[in-house]
Image (cartoon, rainbow, N blue to C red):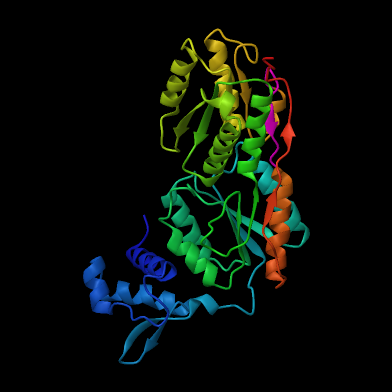
Amino acid sequence: MESKYVHVKKNLLEQILSGKYAINDKLPTESELMAQYHVSRYTARRAVGELENENYVYRIQGGGIFVSDWLAKDSGQLKNKMIGVITTHLANYIFPNIITGIDRTLSKNGYSILLSNTQNNPEKERQAIVKMMENDLSGLIIEPTQSAVNKVNFDLYERLEIGKLPVIFINAHYDELSLPFIEMNDESGEEQITDYLFKNHHKHVLGVFKTDDLQGIHRMNGFIKSCQKHSASSYLSEVVMYTTGDDMQQIFKRVEQILLREDRPTAIACYNDQLAIQLIALIKTLGLSVPTDVSVVGFDNYQLSEFTDPSLTTINHLKEQLGRAAGSMILDMINHKDVKSITYPPELIIRRSVLDLK
């Protein structure tokens, strides 16, 4: 259990970092802090004293406590060679490859990485960003959490944008911010793989997409664009949407109900390979065959997708290459070089999970 002064300090620091207290704003007095947090004068004074020692606040004798220009602190000298990396996951799916790419590039240049996993939870993301901002980092690489719906932490992103710390986004970005990014062209990739289904004479395609992150939104938009392009043959197509907090068993039940209909879809376009592999297993439990009865396509070229039965047609995600590029970009920013955002074009990988219905 954290001590009372640490609790007070953390709360004040988050309010400073988030911009609730701007530079040169006056903080509550010691007496006001005592009343607000139900602590002694000694505790309030100790919390403020540590913030003062860390150059987040300054005192004016007889005038009070004010917020320092903390965005400029240590701008000329970096105390360590540590890069923060915040992702929605760490140990599963494509993330180990991305992190490996980042680490290989940075370690060759004498930098280490400080990892944080948000588990796609906005509250955990906020805690991670604040913690990273407290550390004396050389740079920060962020994969946004629930990027299609989560603007809860946008205030912190805006603080990072105007600060001096080099920051980049991976896998998704916000158009409202000028921070550079590296990502796949998700919309174009999904459009391409859905086009492939229509070229193989499928007319009833089910799209299953996660819609609380921008990757999922862009992929769903690509699916819809392809359906619009092939309107003469895609009019039976439909979409199932889900979000991080949804019970996936209920989503699978919904897909199962669709597959048990007489007019079941002949193909399923999935948000990613992980979902595609799960749906292939579901299809088999219903006594159906992939691709004879239902074709399935994924996205990301997850390493297991090549070894499923049947092997999965997918769009390649340049996982380790993206990580290496992120490492190189953050190093360039540290060295005050100009950088440009990168969007990788899609690459369709054709395997055995799609049947031509001609």
Given residues 329 and 236, the one toward you in this image is: 236
Tell me the chief SS of the magenta region: loop
Residue at the image position 23 percent from the left and 66 percent from the top: 38
Look at the image and say whether residue 311 sits in the magenta stretch: yes
Q: Quadrant of residue 315?
A: top right
Viewport quadrant of the C terminus: top right
Q: Relative to residue 54, is residue 321 depicted above or below? A: above
Picture coordinates of residue 136 (x, y %)? 57, 69
Q: Position of residue 229 (x, y in %)?
A: 60, 34
From what the image shows, is residue 24 above or below residue 352? below
Query: Residue 228 appears in which quarter of the rendering?
Result: top right
User: In the figure, residue 354 lies in which quadrant?
Assistant: top right
Range covered by the magenta-colored residues? 308-317
Residue visible at 30% across and 92% down in the picture: 62
Q: Tell me the quadrant of the picture where the N terminus can be found.
A: bottom left
Q: Residue at x 45, y 28 (%)?
A: 248
Nearer-the-camera pick, 56 or 169:
169
Res. 34 visible in picture = yes
How many numbered marks appear? 0
Instruction: Confirm whether the magenta stretch covers residue 271.
Output: no
Location of residue 171 with respect to 47 vertically, above or below: above
